[in-house]
Image (cartoon, rainbow, N blue to C red):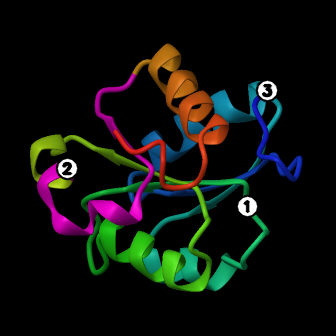
Amino acid sequence: MTMNSNGNKSILIVEDQPMVANALKMILKIDGYDVTTASNGPEALEVYQPGKFGLIFTDYKMPGMSGHEVAETIRSRDAKQRIILITAYSDLAQHDNRSVNVDFVLEKPWSVEGLRAAITKVMSAEAGAGKS
């Protein structure tokens, strides 16, 4: 299990598709993380508090509020928050000028190994230095 420098093993998943959110949650719980889920951006922002989560996963394309908007709002509250953007639209997501607000872009479909590698990369890098 990878943790941030504060030992925080809590993860927030922001995903509008319940099957995807549940799959992520199951894998992360198996790996020993405490997982909170939110089905949209506003719900995520209600539960988010600086320092509460070691890592945030957010879907790119969600109704109402995109993953980039979620990341931008969270980074305005805590510039060091580690964020992984999950997307099936990686070309669009990576070339969006708001990608500076995420540490890593994980493409769908992702594998368990790819998910774990993304976590390791983001959590072992300085905030902002792990962008891919």
Q: Which residues are magenta?
A: 94-110
- In the rendered structure, find residue 53 and report the number of the disc placed on it: 1
Residue type at the position of mark 1? Phe
Q: Nearer the viewer, residue 56 or 39?
A: 56
Name the quadrant containing residue 88: top left
21 lies left or right of 80: left
In terms of sequence position, does the residue under pointer 2 or pointer 3 come before the other? 3
Circle 3 residue? 1
Compare marks 1 and 3 and give the one earlier in the sequence.
Answer: 3
Q: Secondary structure at mark 2?
A: helix
Q: Earlier in the sequence, mark 2 or mark 1?
A: 1
Quadrant in the picture for residue 15:
bottom left
Element under disc 1: loop
Q: Nearer the viewer, mark 2 or mark 1?
A: 2
User: Which residue lies under the disc numbered 2?
Assistant: 94
C-alpha gap between disc 1 and disc 3:
15 Å
Q: Residue furthest right?
A: 7
At 40% from the left and 77% from the top, the residue drawn is: 72
Magenta segment includes 20: no
Q: Quadrant of the C terminus?
A: top left
Q: CA distance from mark 2 to mark 1?
A: 24 Å
52 to 15, vertically: above or below? below
Q: Secondary structure at mark 3?
A: loop
Left or right, 7 with reference to 80: right
How far across and down, in percent of the image, does residue 28 sit? 68, 34
In the image, 100 versus 50, the foreground residue is: 100
Residue at x-position 45% and y-position 82%? 73
Q: Is residue 131 above or below residue 99?
A: above
**Of discs 2 and 3, which sits in the foreground?**
2
Asked whether the beta carbons under mark 2 and mark 3 sit within 8 Å of each other, the answer is no
User: How many residues crowd around disc 1 within 10 Å: few (fewer than 14), some, or many (20 or more)?
Assistant: many
